[in-house]
């Protein structure tokens, strides 16, 4: 069996590394030459736990990296994992996927093999039927379902646990027609992800399942953040105890109830915008989803207000941001609320120092010389007038009174409650904790 994976971002690189490390001949394709040559040397282009090890194993076994799209020839399965970013108006930008699908169509027109094309990229419901399928049929002059298979296969992996989620996802969703291609794909996944439930449905439903997942996760986060803000107004309440108790109710579940500065990343914010956009176009008022998004944006404003209330005018003040990665375990800052906070504070004239164990280089690409970048937590806190913990990195749990002593003003805002329960000699505010009486 030979498999091609087009687009070597988080999803594509992880998938191709896992496939080849298991002994399946895999061609990883990306149009970016520089990226390809780095990956071919066993260096991932982003930080992801265990990826480097898996990639190296894959390269030793059955992984070929190339920028030549024609390498898809004679592949049994072609996974498309290119990005579907967000346009300025919140709509989804399909230009990468359209371009790839056009070229794949042309290439398979000469192919004797009947490949199965799987779209992993997140696409708005209707895209497979109305955009991808017609482009493929037009360019290949072949018929889907007869000469090649076309299957929606949304991806649910989470950054920072991408390898684990690729090996053992909670579900495999396959959208399309129930043809021989679907049977072959089902067989493939039942071996690749044994004991994982497989849901077979049509294209539109498969596309919708992905959006429903991500918007529900965002809803859970905004819900707990709203409750956290209420808790903050009630002396001595604790949002984590509230969330833990709620999580024990099997109807609710304990995941994604960790209150904080709001959700970020390359998926949740983009997907919720795309579905709001679609919903409005369909004439369905997206009341709940709009509120979810609004609550998310308000979290950052709450933090800015808190800083102002405690240190007065922000202009000229030295503030330290602890964590800019959108969550721990990654160097990814796409959609990071922490990046938004830095932008807001810079506009207000703050002098910002940033610490992050993994994401400093990525932050530098945005803020250049407008902020300071510091590698150790004690140096980051030295002389600052307020420290704001944004990402739940373990490093921040080690902050103690010796480190705090070096701060010019001992004021800490802890959006993730990592320092809760420590006897700190500082003014301490945490999202979701009512002030001690
Ligand atoms: C998300 C989906 O979880 C995944 O299924 C999909 O394939 C891609 O999008 P990811 O972007 O990796 O994954 O991030 P995720 O772990 O979902 O976290 C998103 C944001 O929510 C982060 O900013 C995180 O800090 C925040 N979050 C998450 C909370 O604030 N509280 C929580 O309880 C969980």
Image (cartoon, helix red, strand yellow):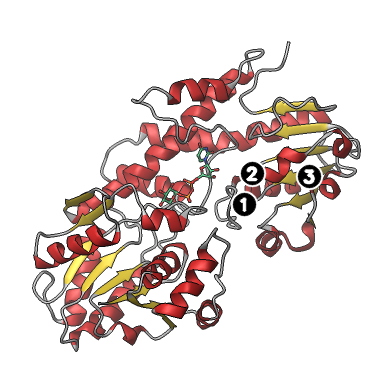
Mark 2 or mark 3: whose residue is earlier in sequence: 3
Q: Tell me where residue 47 appears, x and y as whole percent.
A: 58, 62
User: Label 1, on which residue?
Assistant: 325
Q: Secondary structure at mark 3?
A: strand
Task: Decide: is 195 above or below 50.
Answer: above
Looking at the image, residue 304 sits to the left or right of residue 181; the answer is right
Q: Secondary structure at mark 2?
A: loop
Q: Nearer the viewer, residue 316 or 192?
A: 192
Looking at the image, residue 331 sits to the left or right of residue 227; the answer is right
Mark 3 or mark 1: whose residue is earlier in sequence: 3
Label 1 lies in ligand 1 vicinity (Cβ under 8 Å): no
Q: Is the residue under label 1 in contact with that under label 3 (CB below 8 Å)?
A: no
User: Residue 391 got which mark?
Assistant: 2
User: Label 3, on which residue?
Assistant: 320
Q: Tell me where residue 71 appears, x and y as whole percent.
A: 33, 85
Q: Nearer the viewer, residue 126 or 235?
A: 235
The alpha-carbon separation of the residues under discs 2 and 3 comes to: 13 Å
Please indicate, yes or no, whether residue 265 appears anywhere in the rendered image: yes
Which residue is rendered at x = 68% and y = 64% of the image? 365
Q: Is the residue under label 2 in contact with that under label 1 (CB below 8 Å)?
A: yes
User: Residue 353 got which mark?
Assistant: none
């Amino acid at each position: 069996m030979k498999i091609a994976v087009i687009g070597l971002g988080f999803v594509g690189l992880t998938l191709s590394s896992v496939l080849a490390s298991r002994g399946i001949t895999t061609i990883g394709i990306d149009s970016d030459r520089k990226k390809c040559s780095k990956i071919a040397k066993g260096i991932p282009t982003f930080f992801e736990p265990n990826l480097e090890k898996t990639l190296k194993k894959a390269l030793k076994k059955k992984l070929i990296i190339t920028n030549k799209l024609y390498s898809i020839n004679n592949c049994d399965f072609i996974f498309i994992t290119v990005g579907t970013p967000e346009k300025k108006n919140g709509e989804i930008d399909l230009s990468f996927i359209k371009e790839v699908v056009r070229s794949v169509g042309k290439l398979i027109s000469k192919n004797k093999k009947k490949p199965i094309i799987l779209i992993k990229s997140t696409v708005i419901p209707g895209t497979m039927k109305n955009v991808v399928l017609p482009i493929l049929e037009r360019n290949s002059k072949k018929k889907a379902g007869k000469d090649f298979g076309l299957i929606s296969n949304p991806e649910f992996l989470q950054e920072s646990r991408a390898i684990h989620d690729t090996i053992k996802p909670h579900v495999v969703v396959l959208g399309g027609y129930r043809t021989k291609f679907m049977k072959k794909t089902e067989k493939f996944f039942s071996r690749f992800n044994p004991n994982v439930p497989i849901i077979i449905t049509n294209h539109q439903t498969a596309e919708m399942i992905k959006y429903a997942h991500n918007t529900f996760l965002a809803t859970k986060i905004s819900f707990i953040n709203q409750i956290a803000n209420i808790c903050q107004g009630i002396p001595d309440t604790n949002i984590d105890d509230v969330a833990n108790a709620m999580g024990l109710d099997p109807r609710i579940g304990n995941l994604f109830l960790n209150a904080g500065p709001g959700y970020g990343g390359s998926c949740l914010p983009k997907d919720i915008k795309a579905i709001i956009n679609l919903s409005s176009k369909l004439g369905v008022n997206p009341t709940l989803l709009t509120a979810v998004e609004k609550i998310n944006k308000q979290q950052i404003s709450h933090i800015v207000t808190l800083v102002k209330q405690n240190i007065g005018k922000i202009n000229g003040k030295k503030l330290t941001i602890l964590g800019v990665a959108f969550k721990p375990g990654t160097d990814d800052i796409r959609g990071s609320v922490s990046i938004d906070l830095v932008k807001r504070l810079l506009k207000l004239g703050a002098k910002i120092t940033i610490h992050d164990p993994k994401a400093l280089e990525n932050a530098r690409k945005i803020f250049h010389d407008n902020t300071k970048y510091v590698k150790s937590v004690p140096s980051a806190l030295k002389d600052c007038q307020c420290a704001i913990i944004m990402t739940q990195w373990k490093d921040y749990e080690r902050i103690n009174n010796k480190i705090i002593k070096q701060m010019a003003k001992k004021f800490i805002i802890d959006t993730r409650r990592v320092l809760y329960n420590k006897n700190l000699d500082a003014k301490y505010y945490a999202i979701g904790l009512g002030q001690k009486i």
